[in-house]
Amino acid sequence: MKKWSLHNRSRLTLTLSLLLGYAATVTSQTLVERLGYPKNAILLIVNNDDAGMCHAANTGTIKGLQEGLISSSTIMFTCPWATEIVDFAKTHPDKDFGVHLTLTSEWKHYKWGPVAPIDRVRSLVDSNGYFWKGVQEVYQHGNAEQAYEEGKAQIEKALSYGLPITHIDSHMGTFQLDPAYFEQYARLAKTFNLPLRMASQSTLEKYGQGGMREKCIQLGLVFPDYLIYEELQNYGEVEDFWVNIIDNLKPGVTELYLHASELTPELEAITGTARKRADELKAFTESSKIREALARKNVQLISYRPLLELQRASNP
C-alpha cells in the first residue's frame, strides 16, 4: 500500500481540524444565533393546535393566521374537517402547517379513530374503533410501536395532499409524556426530517426524561428552547394570562400553543372549553395589550419554517 506523503497527512489533519472547529462553533451557538439572530433575541412561535378538528377550529385558525398573531398551526388528520383546512393550506403556501399527531379522542359525542389500517394499530382503539379517551388509557392499553405506525400514517396523509409540512407536535401530549412514546415521536421526526415540539428542560425532568433534549440534538433534530406548558395549569383570565407570559419571555425560541376557535353552536356542542377557545382567538387577533407586550419585550414572531430550513440544511 502506498504511504501517504507528509503533505497529504498535513492536509488531512488541517481538514479534520477545520471540521471539528466548525462543529464546535455550531454546538456553542444558541438556536437564535443559528437562525441568524443576535444571542439576546426573543423569538416566539404562536402555534394553533387542533386545526381540522371541526369547522369552528378551522375558521378560528384561518382568522388567527390572516388577521392575528398566530404564526403556525397543526392539523388533526384523524378528523373529518381536516380537508377544509387542507384546502386553505394548499391555496396559502405562505402559511405554515404541521401535523398534530393524535392518539386520543377525548370528547363524549364527537369521536375519531386512526388513519392507519385498524388491524395494524389495534391496541390504540377501544371496542368501537375510536382512539382511547385519555392519555393514561393509551399508555395502559397501547403499544408504542403501533403509535409510531399511526403517527407515520398521519404524516404520510398530510404529505399525500402535497402540503409542505413544517413540523410535528402531539395532541394532548400523548407522544411526549412517556419515554417509550417519546422515542417513537423522535423517530418520526428523524424519519421525515421534521422539527418537533419539545418541552422545556424542567418539564422533561419532571417526567423522567431529562436527557431527551440532548438525545434529540444528537439525532440532528431542531426544536424550540422553551414551551409554555406547565404554566397553563394556572390559567386565569385569557388576555392577562398571556400578557404575563409574554412579559416573562427569555432570550431564545419559545413556543406557546393555543386552541383558538370561533364560538359557534358546533364548538359548544363538542367541548366545554368552547368559550376559552373563543377568548384565545379574540386575544390573539384583537387585543392591544398583547401586541403592546410583544413590542415592549421586542419579541419577534416566527413560524416553524426557519427551524425546518435549519434542520434540513444541517441534515440534507
Image (cartoon, grey):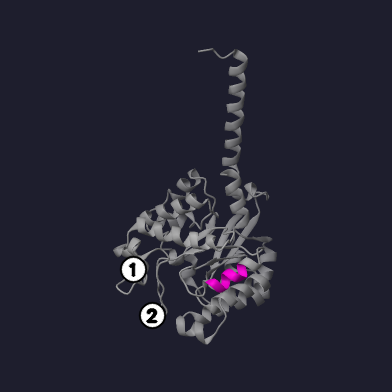
Circle count = 2
Q: Position of residue 203 (x, y in %)?
A: 44, 58
Query: What separation in Å lies between label 2 and label 1 (alpha carbons)?
Result: 15 Å
Most frequent secondary structure within the magenta stretch: helix
The mark found on residue 125 in the picture is 1
Check the picture and name the quadrant holding the C terminus.
Answer: top right
Location of residue 28 (image quadrant): top right
The mark found on residue 108 in the picture is 2
Q: Most extreme residue toward the bottom, as rendered?
A: 265
Can residue 239 be spotted in the picture? no
Q: Nearer the viewer, residue 114 or 218?
A: 114
Q: Is residue 84 magenta?
A: yes
Q: Is residue 104 magenta?
A: no
Mark 2 falls on what kind of element?
A: loop
Mark 1 falls on what kind of element?
A: loop
Q: Magenta residues, as a range?
A: 83-89
Foreground disc of the pair 2, 1 = 1
Can residue 252 be spotted in the picture? yes
Q: Position of residue 10 (x, y in %)?
A: 61, 18
Marks 2 and 1, the one that precedes in the sequence: 2
Q: Position of residue 123 (x, y in %)?
A: 31, 63
Amino acid type assigned to the residue bearing label 1 in the image: Val
Q: What residue is rendered at 49% in x and 53% in y? A: 189
Local crowd size for mark 1, using a 10 Å CA cut-off: few (<14), some (14–19), many (≥20): many
Local crowd size for mark 2, using a 10 Å CA cut-off: few (<14), some (14–19), many (≥20): few
Q: What residue is rendered at 61% in x and 45% in y? A: 313
Q: Position of residue 179 (x, y in %)?
A: 37, 54
Amino acid type assigned to the residue bearing label 2 in the image: Lys
Q: Give the answer, above or below, for where 211 lies relative to 282.
A: above
270 left or right of 46 in image: left
119 left or right of 32 in image: left
